[in-house]
């Protein structure tokens, strides 16, 4: 059960209800006499709060507190792509209002439908309890990504949302820049320089551009356990227009596989019987989309490189005292392990 935001302690616990109430009133969204909020999540990425007023229960999404890296935690970008996808085969929450003016609650934010369902996580406490269900989940994830990539991004109003030409080169440089802005606050990570240079030397040619989610993986998808269908895809802050294989490679980097060993490899859930192997997922994706995944080593190494940079950004917030989340203390060892894993992938021709 969520805890009232007012009962939490620390700067990241509350929503400015006075400012939010002013926004709701100005937009004529409802009566704010009983306005209250509950925390859903904060600290790791964008904050989500459940907002109650006038018989509504909506989710509010805003960036985390403290200084942020440029382009990080862009909730207005999320709101734009969610609005664009409202009437497509891709299930997303309904957007009710978005605000880029920080004078209301101290940051940009948007209000969206509060969707209830189940997310498959690594703890194994989910509806994917049999091999049959896990096979269904595997196939649905491939179909879901293919559905997203089938959306005509120009037709839904995303012209100018990204620059598809040179996508991988720009993405790599963007993340290198993020790393260089972060390291002065943390510690040297020399292995990351090796990975960076390998990635620069092995950038593949990209297929025809599509919408890119940017963080497409199993635990950013919410399911209806009874129907085994997806009811919402979340966390669109890194979405753009670009290489569709970037999303597929990112998902596969988190996908459980019997060939994985410990030492930095990431997974959204355990490698239990029934989940298709990465090779089977690649075959299914190629059949569904007509695109060939011949450079998974690059996409996997890039995924680990990006994740290490994202985590190092979180670690910098921790060492600078901007969060007391105990999870971030573990990044002292976790980020170097990810860097080592990325370098191992660079030197391992596995698919």
Image: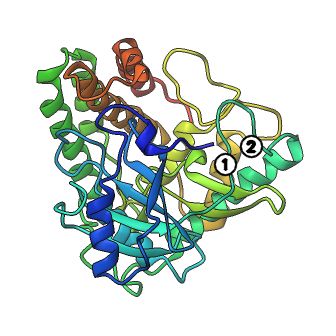
Label 1 Cα neighbours within 10 Å, binned few <14 / some 14-19 / many ≥20: some
- Residue placed at 43% from the left, 22% from the top? 327
- Looking at the image, residue 247 sits to the left or right of residue 320; the answer is right
- Residue placed at 41% from the left, 32% from the top? 304
Q: Position of residue 32 (x, y in %)?
A: 41, 71
Q: Earlier in the sequence, mark 2 or mark 1?
A: 2
In the foreground, 200 or 336: 336
Which of the image's four quarters has the N terminus?
top right
Q: Position of residue 96 (x, y in %)?
A: 43, 76
Q: How far apart are the two marked residues, 2 and 1, measured between alpha carbons?
A: 6 Å
Pointers 2 and 1 in contact (CB under 8 A)? yes
Q: Residue furthest bottom?
A: 155
**Element carrying mark 2:** loop
Residue position for label 2? 276
- Looking at the image, residue 232 sits to the left or right of residue 131; the answer is left
Which of the image's four quarters has the C terminus?
top right
């Amino acid at each position: 059960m969520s805890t009232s935001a007012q009962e939490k302690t620390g700067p990241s616990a509350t929503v400015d209800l006075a400012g939010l109430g002013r926004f709701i009133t100005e937009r004529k969204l409802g009566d704010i006499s009983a306005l209250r909020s509950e925390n859903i999540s904060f600290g790791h990425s964008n904050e989500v709060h459940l907002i109650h007023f006038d018989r509504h229960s909506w989710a509010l999404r805003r960036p985390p507190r403290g200084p942020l890296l440029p382009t990080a935690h862009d909730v207005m970008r999320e709101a734009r792509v969610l609005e664009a996808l409202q009437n497509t085969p891709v299930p997303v929450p309904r957007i009710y209002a978005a605000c880029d003016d920080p004078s209301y609650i101290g940051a940009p934010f948007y209000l969206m439908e509060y969707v209830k369902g189940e997310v498959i996580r690594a703890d194994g406490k989910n509806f994917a309890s049999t091999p049959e269900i896990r096979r269904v989940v595997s196939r649905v994830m491939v179909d879901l990504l293919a559905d997203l990539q089938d959306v005509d991004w120009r037709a839904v109003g995303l012209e100018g949302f990204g620059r598809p030409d040179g996508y991988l080169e720009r993405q790599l440089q963007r993340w290198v820049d993020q790393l260089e802005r972060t390291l002065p606050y943390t510690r040297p990570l020399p292995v990351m320089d090796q990975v960076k240079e390998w990635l620069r030397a092995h950038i593949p040619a990209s297929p025809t551009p599509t919408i890119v989610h940017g963080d497409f993986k199993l635990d950013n998808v919410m399911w209806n356990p009874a129907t085994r269908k997806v009811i919402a895809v979340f966390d669109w802050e890194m979405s753009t227009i670009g290489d569709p294989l970037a999303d597929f490679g990112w998902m596969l980097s988190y996908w459980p596989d019997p060939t994985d060993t410990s030492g930095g490899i990431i997974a959204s859930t355990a490698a239990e019987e029934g989940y298709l192997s990465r090779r089977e997922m690649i075959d299914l994706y190629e059949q569904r989309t007509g695109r060939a995944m011949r450079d998974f080593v690059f996409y996997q190494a890039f995924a680990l490189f990006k994740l290490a940079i994202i985590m190092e950004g979180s670690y910098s917030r921790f060492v600078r005292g901007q969060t007391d989340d105990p999870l971030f203390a573990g990044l002292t060892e976790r980020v170097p392990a990810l860097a080592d894993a990325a370098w191992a992938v660079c030197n391992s021709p596995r698919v």
